[in-house]
Image: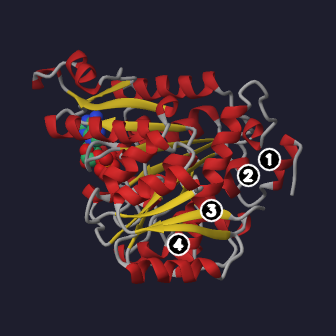
Amino acid sequence: MPSIRVLIVDDVRNTRESIRRILSFDSDFEVVGEAGCGSDALRLTELLKPDIVLMDISMPDIDGIKTSELLSFRAPNTSVIIMSVEKDSDHMTKAMLAGAKAYLVKPFTGNEVTSTILNVYHKEARKREIISSPSTPQPSEKDNSGKIISIFSTKGGVGKTTTAVNLAVELRKSHAFQVLLMDLNLQFGDIASFLNLVPKKTISDLVQINTIKEEDIRFHILTHSSGADVLAASTRPEYAEMVSPEHIEQILQEMKPHYDFIICDNSTRFDDISLASLEIADEIWMVVGMDIPAIKNTKLALEILYSLDYTPKIKLILNKYDRRIGIGIKEIESSLGKKINYVLPDEEQLTSVLNKGIPFVEALPRSAMAQETKKMIKYLTDTVPPVKVSSENTKGKSSGLQKILGFGR
Ligand SMILES: Nc1ncnc2c1ncn2[C@@H]1O[C@H](COP(=O)(O)OP(=O)(O)O)[C@@H](O)[C@H]1O
Ligand SMILES: [Mg+2]
């Protein structure tokens, strides 16, 4: 592989030097230049055409966000990675909107910077490859492996977990699909309690293993009475930190061939974990609430998702719809600039069935919510018919599915 050409942009000379030193130990990287301000960064990027620009935010002339935005037009083949001491979601959001492909919070380790560069570089190279050969569909692993649906919202309490859980249970119960629910709300995930499961083994236990293999993941999976599998979130918020975006990618890649559907429930932030699941997902389903702040934030989130080229993957679910509130669906669609795909009405009895740990598709199968969930499933099964397997629980004997599909490791 030719070296990845990197330009380092930071107004502090020591920072530039220490990054240069880190990268010099690895022949995968070649530092092609350094800039101490935004205008030099623009000039050098246009001149040197690096693969990656490592970009500080606060700089004396043009700041790193503005510079990244300008570069996204002037040097579209160069990927910007922001490096900043700011770790709030506001800065991260601005960076994403400016076209940055990743965000490193200072101080970072050598390992973090090298793995982030490699990650961004390979993803972008793959994207360019796909774009340049649109007419030759690759017989990829995608063809015979499951569909990943990542459920996201910018606000808690809008119904992500409710949607994820019921979708999974219905897919499994009524259609006998193999389904994995992954709780990526790592700190405060509640899928296990939605399903009355005791999370003895969680994703934070799983990631202690060095090279995670399918058997390890299966060992950490819980199974709901419907047959849907669950990889539960950490039992304590502080354990969530052990899980990295690379772990998420690894788990999803490892399990994709063994399930018809993997449904990821996310936190409400564009953090590296949710971004990893959004990136790898085939479908991104945004859940929107009925209040103005939720709608406004959804609009902002959509802009970020568009800028990440996820437009074709996005669907909108309006939840807790109540016509008495006085905002119409058309009005919400026009403020979001996007059609709402599914509408789940406000259901009075939901909290009481939730408190019993029963999904509404089981407790209230005739409710309008359950009917709308069936429509979602119809879309999923109509668009890319997944590989349907027998209703027999194949947990612990995945090779059965592998044999049916005719591939193995
Ligand atoms: N359509 C609905 N009607 C009534 N209550 C709902 C509806 N959808 C979700 N809820 C309730 O709202 C609360 C938050 O839902 P949840 O799925 O946990 O949201 P999130 O995962 O987005 O934080 C739960 O108590 C849930 O029962
Ligand atoms: Mg939730």
Q: Can you identify the residue that label 3 sits on?
A: 5
- The amino acid pointed to by label 4 is Val
- The amino acid pointed to by label 3 is Arg
- Of callouts 1 and 4, which one flags the residue occurring earlier in the amino acid sequence? 4
User: Does mark 1's beta carbon lie closer than 8 Å to ligand 2?
Assistant: no
On screen, 92 above or below 8? above
Q: Which quarter of the figure is the C terminus placed in?
A: bottom right
Q: Can you identify the residue that label 2 sits on?
A: 394
Counting other residues with Cα less than 10 Å from the Cα at mark 4, is it few (<14), some (14-19), or many (20 or more)?
many
For mark 3, give the secondary structure. Answer: strand
For mark 2, give the secondary structure. Answer: loop
Q: How many angstroms separate mark 3 from mark 2 (CA)?
A: 47 Å
Q: Can you identify the residue that label 1 sits on?
A: 401
Q: Can you identify the residue that label 4 sits on?
A: 113
Residue 223: horizontal and vertical position, in percent?
Answer: 57, 57
Residue at position x 75%, y 61% in the image: 2
Q: Is residue 88 left or right of residue 341?
A: left
Residue at position x 65%, y 65% in the image: 217
Mark 4 vs mark 3, foreground winner is 3
Residue 144: horizontal and vertical position, in percent?
Answer: 77, 38
On screen, 301 above or below 198? above
Residue 247: horizontal and vertical position, in percent?
Answer: 58, 66
Q: Along the line of sight, which residue is nearer the eye, 396 or 284? A: 284
Q: How many angstroms separate mark 1 from mark 3 (CA)?
A: 43 Å
Q: How many angstroms separate mark 1 from mark 2 (CA)?
A: 7 Å
Mark 1 vs mark 3, foreground winner is 3
Is any atom of residue 196 visible in this view? Answer: no
User: Does mark 4's beta carbon lie closer than 8 Å to ligand 2?
Assistant: no
- The amino acid pointed to by label 2 is Thr
